[in-house]
Image (cartoon, rainbow, N blue to C red):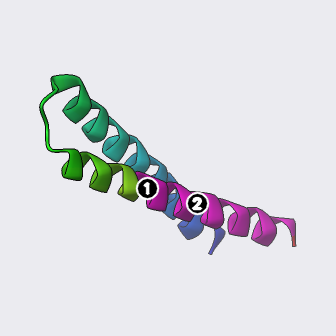
């Protein structure tokens, strides 16, 4: 159980980095679609929240 959760936390962290860089590249190019940029940053926040929540749950499981 803990191994599967650790794997999911890792996947979510990779997802956060991918979405972050996709948003940063769009902003760096300039003249991009602001709606797309907002959507990417919204997804980044959602993925970060999920990663933190699962990480805390994993710590709680490992503690007990």
Residue at left offset 77%, top offset 72%: 61
Image position of 56 (left or right of 39): right
Q: Nearer the viewer, residue 9 or 51?
A: 51
Residue 28 lies, with reference to residue 1, above or below; the image says: above
Mark with earlier residue (1, 2): 2
Element carrying mark 2: helix
Name of the residue lying farthest toward the right: 64
Look at the image and tell me in which quarter the N terminus lies.
bottom right
Q: Overall secondary structure of the magenta stretch?
A: helix
Verify whether residue 45 appears in magenta. yes
Q: Nearer the viewer, residue 12 or 61?
A: 12
Residue at left offset 29%, top offset 39%: 23
> Which residue position is annotated with label 1?
11
* Displayed quadrant of residue 25: top left
Residue 42 lies, with reference to residue 17, above or below; the image says: below
- Give the image location of residue 10, x and y in percent: 50, 52
Residue numbers of the magenta segment: 44-63
Verify whether residue 31 appears in magenta. no
Residue 47 lies, with reference to residue 30, above or below; the image says: below
Image position of 63 (left or right of 28): right
**Number of other residues with Cα within 10 Å of mark 2, as a class: few under 14, some 14 to 19, many 20 or more:** some
Q: How many marks?
A: 2
Residue at left offset 16%, top offset 26%: 30
* Displayed quadrant of residue 6: bottom right
Marks 1 and 2 sit apart, C-alpha to C-alpha, by 9 Å
Element carrying mark 1: helix
> Which residue position is annotated with label 2?
6
């Amino acid at each position: 159980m803990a191994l599967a959760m650790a794997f999911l936390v890792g996947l979510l962290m990779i997802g956060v980095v991918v979405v972050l860089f996709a948003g940063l590249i769009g902003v760096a190019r300039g003249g991009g679609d602001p709606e797309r940029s907002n959507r990417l940053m919204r997804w980044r926040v959602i993925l970060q929240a999920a990663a933190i929540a699962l990480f805390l749950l994993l710590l709680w499981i490992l503690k007990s």
